[in-house]
Image: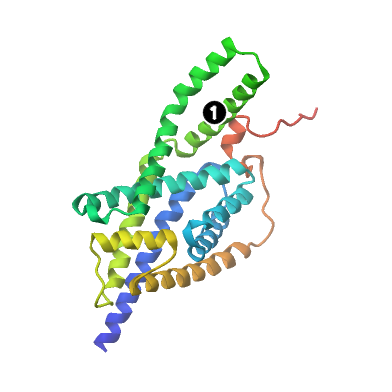
Amino acid sequence: MTAVLKILLTGIIILVLFLLIHAFKLMRMYLVLIDTRIEFKRFVFAYFRTTLVNLLIPFKLGEVYRVFVFYRLCGNFATGFLSVVVDRFFDTLALVFVMLPFQILYPDTLSFVSVMLAVFLAVIVFAYMIFPPTYRYLNKYIILNRVSPRSMAVLKLLNGLKVWYEYVKSLIAGRYALLLLMSFGAWFFEGLLFRLLSVFYPYSSFDARGFCEYITSLLSSVPKTLEQRAYGRMCIILTLILTVISAVICLSRKGPRQISADDNPEGAYQGRHNLLPNRRRKG
């Protein structure tokens, strides 16, 4: 009887930790897209079905599908693409901060995956920081000194990049700390969950090397150890259940929803900054 209660309690703890992990990840993505005013249950269904695809397709190629889903959901490619990039950035930033102490204490745990993550962050941060002064200089220089068609094409490209840059700023304005906090929370509970599962395997370890191997297996979807395979199968099964539940809830609406002018699925930012096509006014 005691063994049964112990197994039952462990199962409940695992389920709670799994729900906490995805609650943090789900709310992080929703916070990025909050200005688009997507109906919450539609967003939840989109989140879980894209997460399921990500678990089934190796090397995180499911992110391409996530971009497509959120593009269809928001009605705007910039929203779909940039929201996924921003979400991945904060997730990776928190992960690198978590991995860094391990790799300082144990330099032999440095892996190709951790190097690529660090490079990804460095490139994104560098580009984000240097764009405003670079744009101002090149924009002024071309306007004052160049009139060729090629120069005008470069100027048009710069203005397009400026629009995307400002759009990224709008997605994270005033939300930096919350997005990073949610990312840390998700990784903290994911580490606890994996540690709890590793207890059931007598030859497993959850040291610095085990943690780095665990991260590598998550990114490649190619688990190596018994606990990694068990964790992967558990995540797929639970995510599939949550996907079905969210689909049922999403599709069980009582009637067609009336869309008002404020519920433009392309997002509030596009309207405020004239990213939408101009429409002729009647009258």
Residue situated furthest left in the rendering: 105
Residue 59 coordinates in the image, percent (x, y): 47, 58
Residue situated furthest top in the rendering: 144
Residue situated furthest bottom in the rendering: 1
Return the residue nearer the eye: 144 or 195: 144
Label 1 amino acid?
A: Lys
Badge 1 crowding class, 10 Å Cα cut-off, few under 14, some 14 to 19, many 20 or more, is: some
Residue 82 coordinates in the image, percent (x, y): 53, 42
Q: Which quadrant is the C terminus positioned in?
A: top right
Return the residue nearer the eye: 172 or 109: 109
Return the residue nearer the eye: 227 or 3: 227
Tell whether 142 sits left or right of 169. Answer: right
Q: Please give the name of the residue rendered at 38% of the width and 43% of the height, measured from the top-left corner.
A: 119
User: Is residue 59 shown above or below 93?
Assistant: below
Instruction: Give the secondary structure at mark 1.
Output: helix
Q: Which quadrant is the N terminus positioned in?
A: bottom left
Q: Please give the name of the residue rendered at 65% of the width and 62% of the height, measured from the top-left corner.
A: 254
| Badge count | 1
Residue 273 coordinates in the image, percent (x, y): 59, 29
Tell whether 45 sits left or right of 177. Answer: right
Residue 250 coordinates in the image, percent (x, y): 59, 62
Q: Which residue is mark 1?
A: 162
Tell whether 157 sits left or right of 220. Answer: right
